[in-house]
Amino acid sequence: MNQLIRCKDCDEIFMKTPFDQHPEYPFDPGRSFETFRTIEADDYQEFLIHHQGHQLEDLEIIEDSFVSEKAYFEPIKTSFFKATNGKEKFVIKKFRKKINEPLKYLLIRGDYSLKCTAIKVQSGEVSKQLKRELNPPPSQNRIDAFLKLCQTITEDIEVKDLERIPEESHRPLEIYYKMDDIHLMYLLRNCRNIFKGQEYSAMEEFIHRHKDDGVLLLKATYKIQLSERVKPDKKFIPTSLPLKEARIMEKK
Ligand SMILES: [Zn+2]
């Protein structure tokens, strides 16, 4: 079980988990499970020694709060999640700069939200699929005109009005949405200016085939927007050293 510990005096964090700390260990039969535990325990001991005499508290990780700028399987990335001590909420930044480095955790006072930065038509995929499915395929000019029309319509759309598609995305900050009915109607109507007769009917079918889970889904890109709170004034902390350290100093 993971345990997230915060030093209230230093605002430092320790994630107590045997595997997060050293996930890159290649399997080595000579190294038993005990070794993992020892290394983890050593790190924890170090944390405890460093924060001796300080007030420690457990934080509870807030479920489903995890966000990351890169794919989940990428080993080098920065992620964020939220945690609480029951009274106050914190943002925990989890990161690693090199593959062989242990994960680091940083406490941030504040919050984050996801901000939509762009909604785009999947132009490349739409174009490829049109050429594959329509026989004969529309001319490149008409395909380009269709893509331009889709993009123009998309510029008028707000992400909050769209229905999200619960699709597995490798990139956590890319989310797919269905075009709403009003904009879809507008798209179909304007297609009449580009395609005629048989080709228009084929396009109409294409749009209906791809609007709910196909290439006509709109791709929204998000960014993580972090807002930091100013740390409240600390209570008076005596400047003298804790007793044990003071004694060591005396002996020198
Ligand atoms: Zn401390």
Image: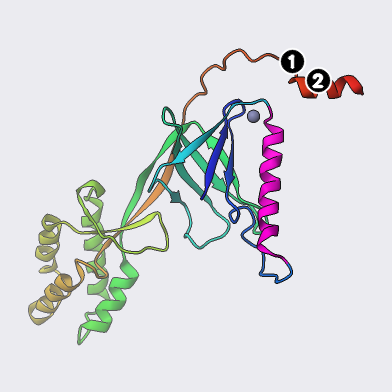
Q: Locate residue 247: give its quadrant.
A: top right
Give residue 115's position: percent from left, percent from top.
36, 44
For badge 2, the amino acid type reads Ala
For badge 1, the amino acid type reads Ser
Circle number at residue 186:
none
Residue drawn at x 60%, y 54% is: 18
Q: CA distance from mark 2 to mark 1?
A: 8 Å
Q: Nearer the viewer, residue 200 or 62?
A: 62
Residue drawn at x 68%, y 13% is: 238
Give residue 122's position: percent from left, percent from top.
31, 65
Give residue 83's position: percent from left, percent from top.
45, 38
Residue drawn at x 72%, y 65% is: 31
User: Does 146 sit left or right of 125 as displayed?
Assistant: left
Q: Which residue is mark 1?
A: 240
On-image quarter of the C terminus: top right
Q: Nearer the viewer, residue 248 or 63?
A: 248
User: Does 190 sit left or right of 32 as displayed?
Assistant: left
Q: Locate residue 188: give its quadrant.
A: bottom left
- Using the image, determine if residue 16 lies above or below residue 240: below
Q: Which residues are magenta?
A: 31-52
Give residue 179's position: percent from left, percent from top.
19, 59
Check if residue 180 falls in the magenta segment. no
| Dot 2 and dot 1 residues touching (CB under 8 Å) | yes
Circle number at residue 246:
2
User: Does 81 sit left or right of 234 as displayed?
Assistant: left
